[in-house]
Amino acid sequence: MVNSLEPEFNDRVTFLVANLTTQEGRIFAEMNDSGRVTLLFFNPDGSRIHKLTGVQDAEFLRKVFTRVFKLEG
């Protein structure tokens, strides 16, 4: 679902994917207490501002992106 939203938000949000099959990806996941199907949201300074686990539909994710990154209002 996130991939379907990337074109809509890619001018305002940077999307990065941690490959959990690599040591670097596993370390990143461990450091953020995360696993598969987890979205982590960070400020530009690298501080984590939100975590979402589980598969979500595109409309819900659109609302979360807009709220977390304060894209409207």
Image (cartoon, helix red, strand yellow):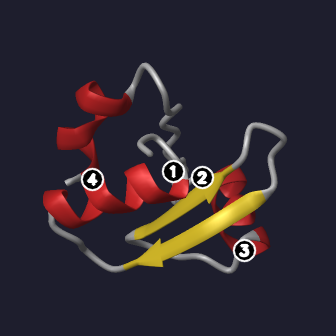
Residue 61: image x %, image y %?
29, 60
Q: Which of the two labelled residues, at mark 1 and mark 3, occupies the earlier sequence position?
A: 1
Q: CA distance from mark 4 to mark 3?
A: 26 Å
Residue 34: image x %, image y %?
59, 76
Identify the residue shown where x is 44% and y is 45%.
73
Is the residue under label 3 in contact with that under label 1 (CB below 8 Å)? no
Q: Pointer 1: what residue?
A: 19
User: In this rendering, is residue 46 above or below 8?
Assistant: below
Q: Residues within 10 Å of mark 4 (few under 14, many from 20)?
A: some
Residue 68: image x %, image y %?
52, 58
Q: CA distance from mark 2 to mark 4?
A: 29 Å
Amino acid type, callout 3: Glu
Q: Left of 47 or right of it: where is 40?
A: left
| Foreground disc of the pair 2, 3 | 3
Is the residue under label 2 in contact with that under label 1 (CB below 8 Å)? yes
Q: Which of the two labelled residues, at mark 4 and mark 3, occupies the earlier sequence position?
A: 3
Q: Quadrant of residue 57?
A: bottom left
Identify the residue shown where x is 72% and y is 46%.
43
Question: Under tag 3, what secondary structure?
Answer: helix
Q: Residues within 10 Å of mark 2 (few under 14, many from 20)?
A: few
Q: Pointer 2: what residue?
A: 22
Identify the residue shown where x is 73% and y is 61%.
48
Residue 62 - label: 4
| Foreground disc of the pair 1, 2 | 1
Amino acid type, callout 1: Asn
Amino acid type, callout 4: Arg
Q: Which of the two labelled residues, at mark 1 and mark 4, occupies the earlier sequence position?
A: 1
Quarter of the picture holding the N terminus: bottom left
Q: Pointer 3: what residue?
A: 30
Q: Which of the two labelled residues, at mark 2 and mark 3, occupies the earlier sequence position?
A: 2
Q: Residues within 10 Å of mark 3 (few under 14, many from 20)?
A: few
